[in-house]
Image (cartoon, rainbow, N blue to C red):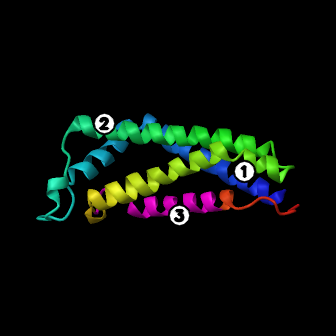
Amino acid sequence: MYTRAAKAGSVLLLAAYLSLAAFGNLTDYDSNFDFVAHVMSMDTTFEGNRGMWRAVESPVLHHVSFVSIIAAQAAASLLCWVGGVRLAFRLDSAEDFHRAKGAAIAGVGLSLLIWFGAFLVIANEWFMMWQSSEWNAKPTAFNLTLLTLLVLVFLASPDDRGDS
């Protein structure tokens, strides 16, 4: 039961983080939007790099991308809150706990898509965020990808042990 409680707690902590991330992006839209705009514009990457054809300079697409990030964070947060609470109410039975994992796994999976997909694959590699000394979130995105993946692996591990 303690292992199941730790799994539910991990999902709820991720929900809290995602909630704060979405909240911060909404309440400080402009400065966080600037990050997305600079990364997509590639205006602080190495001078003369041959990948500049990838740059997106449309403010409309910058806003669409940033709003999509916020929406994904909010959706992942909601799924993790719902999933974590469902798990917390099913700690006594490994079978019931396992059946309640759906929303939690969906939320953690969506979180993985945000940090690994949007930030590491798209921002870091496609838009060469790693080249920027000012607008580089690679270390944070990498850490969040690893933490999210660890929560996912921990959550998905079997619950049929007689842990107490």
Q: Residue furthest left?
A: 48
Q: Is residue 115 magenta?
A: no
Q: Which residue is mark 2?
A: 63
Range shown magenta = 133-153
Along the viewing direction, whichever of 6 and 47 lies nearer the viewer: 6
User: What is the three-letter code of the residue carrying label 1?
Assistant: Ala
Q: Which residue is mark 1?
A: 8
Asked if one can make out residue 38 in the rendered structure from this viewpoint, the answer is yes
Mark 1 to mark 2: distance in Å? 34 Å
Q: Residue at left 84%, top 56%?
A: 1
Along the viewing direction, whichever of 74 and 134 lies nearer the viewer: 74
In the image, is 52 to the left or to the right of 66? Answer: left
Q: Residue at left 53%, top 64%?
A: 146
User: Which circle marks residue 146 in the picture?
Assistant: 3
On the image, the x and y values in percent for residue 132 come to 27, 61
Q: Quadrant of residue 7?
A: bottom right
Q: In front: mark 1 or mark 2?
A: 1
Q: Is residue 145 magenta?
A: yes
Badge 3 or badge 2: first in the primary sequence: 2
Element under disc 1: helix
User: What is the three-letter code of the residue carrying label 3?
Assistant: Leu
In the image, is 83 to the left or to the right of 20? Answer: right
